[in-house]
Image (tube, rainbow, N blue to C red):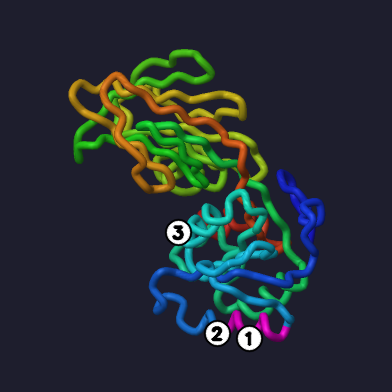
Amino acid sequence: MTSIAGSTPQSDRGAPAAVRRAVVVTHGRPEVIGSALGRVEQVARAAGVELCTAEGAPDGCDLAVVLGGDGTMLRALTRFLGRGVPVIGVNFGRVGFLASIRPDGLEPGLERVFAGEYRVVELPTLEVEAGGERRAAVNDAVATSSVLGRMVELSWEVGGEDLGTVPCDGVVCATPSGSTAYNLSNGGPVLMWGIDAMAITFVAPHSLHARPLVVPRGVDVVIGNRTPGICFTALVDGHAIGEVAPGASARVRLGPERSLLATLPETTFFRRYHETFAS
């Protein structure tokens, strides 16, 4: 197993190069993956790899194999955050930007992975404080109106400096792994894997001056609610964690933990970017 920019070799974390124990994470609807789980079991049996399910995953797993799309990948990256378990995906989703293996290449791909032929990219996460809660975000943190269809007025402060108030539908703070999701669909910048920063992008801003911004580690972003009589909802990786009342604020920064994305050596960021968005 080798590493790329922004990553740490698996050997440096004390794990073996070849996989001996792996956990399988599947899509919530079994019909989506079909016979894929049985195929994984056959490859693992031939390679001498012990498989277990996510529900019964013991400590000491070398790798998590995801059968699903980016949503399932996100769930696995979150589940194994801080546990030192890299996550590799076989794409059974629509986009599958984070997945490294195509369904028709499952057997040869996993044979290589189980033999230790993969790379691990360490991706930054976010630490989000909102509504009295503190959560880690693998993909993004979003502030959006708690009233469907209503615009909100959001102030924003970066590194202790006030940047004004923006009437908008919301704002997205995205990690590099999340920069190709909701952030990208709102015109935000794509952050290459290995960059230790987050992107800030407003959703449908009613302003000519609200431009996306890339913020480095060590700089806090404070999103304030300046909307009379309307709360905004704070979302972490698509899940609501609380409401922020008028006059209150949410705080987002790059967090201490990193998600571990495993890929085949040839599945580079730019190759996935070209295949997904440029072809």
Q: Secondary structure at mark 3?
A: helix
Instruction: Tell whether label 2 touches label 1 (CB within 8 Å).
Output: yes
162 relative to 46, above or below: above
x and y percent of residue 146 in the render? 24, 37
Give the quarter of the image for residue 245. Answer: top left
x and y percent of residue 263 in the render? 66, 61
In reply to whether residue 43 is colored magenta, the answer given is: yes
Residue 279 appears in the figure: no
Q: CA distance from mark 2 to mark 3?
A: 21 Å
Give the quarter of the image for residue 125. Answer: top right
x and y percent of residue 39 in the render? 58, 84
Which secondary structure type mostly characterizes the magenta part of the structure?
helix
Q: Which residue is mark 2?
A: 38
The segment highlighted magenta reads: 38-46
Q: Which residue is mark 1?
A: 42
Q: Amino acid at mark 1?
A: Gln
> Comparing marks 1 and 3, which lies closer to the viewer?
1
Residue 190 appears in the figure: yes
| Quarter in which the N terminus is drawn | bottom right
Residue 71: mark = 3
Answer left or right for 22 relative to 151.
right
Front-most of residues 14 and 246: 14
